[in-house]
């Protein structure tokens, strides 16, 4: 894929240029092949755990990991090495992303009109969704 550089606004881009910006490419693989490969990786990680992650990093990326977690010191060093304007922009973006995600957290309300009856509604679902359950039992959903 050829690098695409542009200075301007998204709205001013022609549709084909927008498509070029969004195209991540798939190396000619079909959606089915990508899905199969992804499923195989997930199955391997479920079966082998962390050992699969170490092996896959070597097989797929050519990197031999010593650990799966990046140390706090290494993260801080990387942040300190960033241009101050880039770091400020990244922090600003992270704050915005967090605000959006917090606004999208599930909201469940429940009430118990009398002992043994619990009625609830999941406010993050469509307006017609609600769930009811006897007290102490797991939630089940009924759509209206």
Image: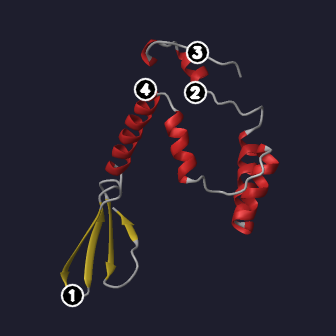
Q: How is the image coloured?
A: secondary structure
Q: CA distance from mark 4 to mark 1?
A: 58 Å
Q: Residues within 10 Å of mark 3 (few under 14, many from 20)?
A: few
Label 2, label 3: how many angstroms apart (C-alpha)?
Answer: 13 Å
Inter-mark Cα distance, 2 to 4? 25 Å
Q: Residue at x 31, y 84 (%)?
A: 135
Chain-order first, disc 1 or disc 2:
2
Write down the quadrant of residue 26 in the picture: top right
Rounded to the nearest angstrom, the CA distance separating label 1 from label 2 is: 55 Å
Where does residue 20 sit, x and y in percent of width and height?
61, 20
In this view, the mark in front (3 or 1): 3
The residue lying toward the viewer, choosing from 96 and 17, is 96
SS type, badge 3? loop
From the top left corner, tell me how far across and down residue 29 is, in percent. Answer: 77, 36
Q: Which residue is mark 4?
A: 85
Residue at 51%, 32% (x, y): give it. 82
Judging depth in this view, the residue of 141 and 33 nearest the camera is 33
Decide which of tag 2 and tag 4 comes sooner along the chain. Answer: 2
Front label number (1 vs 2) = 2
- Given residues 11 and 52, the one toward you in this image is 52
Label 4 or label 3, whichever lies nearer to me, is 4
Question: Circle 3 sits on which residue?
Answer: 5
Q: Earlier in the sequence, mark 4 or mark 3?
A: 3
Indicate which label's residue lies in the foreground, 2 or 3: 3
Quadrant in the picture for residue 46: bottom right
Determine whether 35 is above or below 92 in the image. Answer: below
Q: Which residue is mark 1?
A: 115
Disc 4 and disc 3 in contact, CB within 8 angstroms: no
Q: Are marks 3 and 1 in contact (CB under 8 Å)?
A: no
Numbered disc 2: secondary structure: helix
Residue marked by disc 2: 22
């Amino acid at each position: 894929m050829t690098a695409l550089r542009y200075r301007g606004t998204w709205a001013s881009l022609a549709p084909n240029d927008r498509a070029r910006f969004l195209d991540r490419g798939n190396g000619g693989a079909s959606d089915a092949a990508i899905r199969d490969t992804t499923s195989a990786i997930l199955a391997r990680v479920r079966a082998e755990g962390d050992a699969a992650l170490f092996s896959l990093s070597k097989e797929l990326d050519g990197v031999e990991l010593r650990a799966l977690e990046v140390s706090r010191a290494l993260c801080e060093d990387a942040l300190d090495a960033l241009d101050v304007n880039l770091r400020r922009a990244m922090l600003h973006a992270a704050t915005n992303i967090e605000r959006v995600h917090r606004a999208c957290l599930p909201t469940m309300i429940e009430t118990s009109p009398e002992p043994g009856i619990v009625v609830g509604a999941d406010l993050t679902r469509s307006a017609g969704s609600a769930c009811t359950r006897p007290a102490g039992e797991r939630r089940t959903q009924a759509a209206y």
